[in-house]
Amino acid sequence: MGARGNGGRYRRIGGFMIISEKLISKRATTILSRFPRHLDLTREDKVFAQVVNSLARELDIKTMQVGQVRKSHRLGQADEMRDLLLLAGLHDLRPIRFDIVRLRSDALNGVATILGDESAAAEDREDAVTTLRKLLGLADLGDYALDYSALVEPLRELTGYTSCLGILRYQIQQLIRIHRAGNGSVRSLLEACGAYLHLRVDAISHVGDDYWHIAHCRDLLTLPPKDAAGAAPATTDDWLALEENPFKKTTIAPEEFVHRGKRKILRNGFDPVPVAIAITGIEDRTCYPMLVDTSKGHGLYYAGMVGDGQTLEFTADGRVLLDGAATDTQAFAFSGAVFAENTGLTKASATDFAFCNEHGTTPHGQCGVFVTTEPVEEGFSADLPHMGGLSPAITLAVGATNLQFFVRIAHFGTRTTVPPADQAAIESYSAGHYNTSLFALDTTGAGALDAAALIGFAWQEREAFKVIVWLPSRFASYDLHIESAEPTLAQRLRTLLDRHRAAGISLDIQYASDLWQLPYGYITDADSPQSYKSITAGSRLWNTGSPQPTS
């Protein structure tokens, strides 16, 4: 006999009241269906059915727990941060490898805190919005521009637990994929860099004689539209750049050069490079200095005096400066008409220039040609100063480059005796023309024995076994949210990329600047394709009054 109440069913058996469930679970029904059907054990009023149902409840819990364990072991299904980090640990991906995204989230949270503070000053809110645009690379805020407070909720969601869980899952997947594909390549470095920063690499292009590799990316930390009908805030184009064998400055300290002094520069490298030359005057001896690459027949000439302690610079990009002031109107470069002396004092070599014979060949070396000068035509006979311009620099070859230095020399008159037909000796005289010239007299006639100038050399040499990864300048904004004692974003990324670089390759991380810098900047209009050179040289003009770089 039973009674109904509280949605259950009661039965008294042997003096005991048994409370049964209203329905038997599906799992219990499945178990009972295994028994012979004539026992009719699936009836709810059967005590056997109630016992099986009670035992099955524990089995349901165990099955659910097994399902949760199975889920936590699957990268695409785990919904706990701890489970994802344990899975990452199986691949030796420690929590520090995901620290940069945490840094980005903390910076965005700081902006959300200011925008959500109703007591914050309007100026602080404007600064926070400016910071947000830098952090996320936003070209504009879209519909949010009219209501900054509407940014708070999207930023909270962007940095919330669910979002961070998805970011962590994506990063682990990408890093495992990169490791499986293989490290040590340009692609692996750029893709790993994108994974750590939470950028999606869409394509990689190779430019600049294959020294430059540009990864075109999209930032995965983005703001959603303000409403379903609106448009998401516009973002700027993102990229990562890898520069192989970057340039480093190589110098030769100033050395004393006499008139006709020679210098052989030996260098290893990948390509010929233009060299900057600094000529420092000594007393009054540095008169109309000239430096010539005797192997190529290319030289630089300055028609004027370089005073004691003054420095004349022929820059690698063709400018001519005297103590920092432009003096290109008195200088030019020339090519051709560089001939070897054959006076017994010097011996011609295979690289010297000489006149061609009647067969169009030279007895030694290269065939000489008529001289040409830049930026002024017929510079040696032109009226100076001229209109000015760039003088193409001397280029250092891979291997040996032979240079020779000259200044304008004045000689004392010489005395000769010419016997006439009747054998009577008559003395005749010739004299040099003195025009602010260097008096150089020695017994051999080879030129001055005293140093005529100090000459130093500098050029940009490609550094072997080194790469630089360039980050967009906006990522430097995250360093403002880091304590001074902590490593910067670039320093953290440098450590993380150690696992992806090839052994023996030195790696450096730098922020690129899109601001134009003299003399390497590239100014382009909005419709021009982005030049890889503007990544480091810059194409955007500085704002009026902004601090300028000092080096």
Image (cartoon, rainbow, N blue to C red):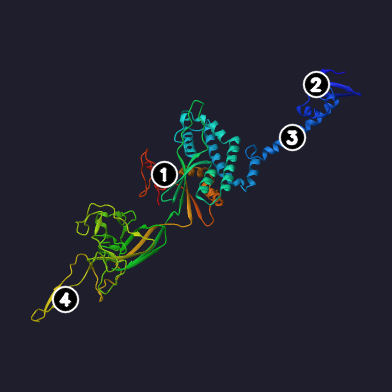
Q: Residue furthest bottom?
A: 423
Q: CA distance from mark 3 to mark 2?
A: 26 Å
| Front tag of 2 and 4 | 2
| Front tag of 3 and 2 | 3
**Contact between labelled residues 4 and 2, with CB atoms less than 8 Å apart:** no
Query: Which mark is on residue 514?
Result: 1
Q: CA distance from mark 3 to mark 1?
A: 58 Å
Please tell me whether mark 2 sits on a helix, a strand or a loop: strand
Please tell me whether mark 1 sits on a helix, a strand or a loop: loop
Q: CA distance from mark 1 to mark 4?
A: 68 Å
Label whose residue precedes the other's in the sequence (2 or 1) = 2
Residue 487 seen from this side: no
**Label 2 amino acid?**
Gly
Label whose residue precedes the other's in the sequence (3 or 2) = 2
Per the image, the residue denoted by label 3 is 63
Query: Which mark is on residue 8?
Result: 2
Q: Position of residue 115 (x, y in %)?
A: 52, 33
**Label 1 amino acid?**
Asp
Q: Nearer the viewer, residue 176 or 241?
A: 176
| Front tag of 2 and 1 | 2
Residue 538 seen from this side: yes
Query: Which mark is on residue 415?
Result: 4
**Contact between labelled residues 4 and 1, with CB atoms less than 8 Å apart:** no
Q: Residue at x 45, y 57 (%)?
A: 463
Q: Position of residue 533 (x, y in %)?
A: 40, 47
Q: Residues within 10 Å of mark 1 (few under 14, many from 20)?
A: many
Q: Nearer the viewer, residue 509 or 84?
A: 84
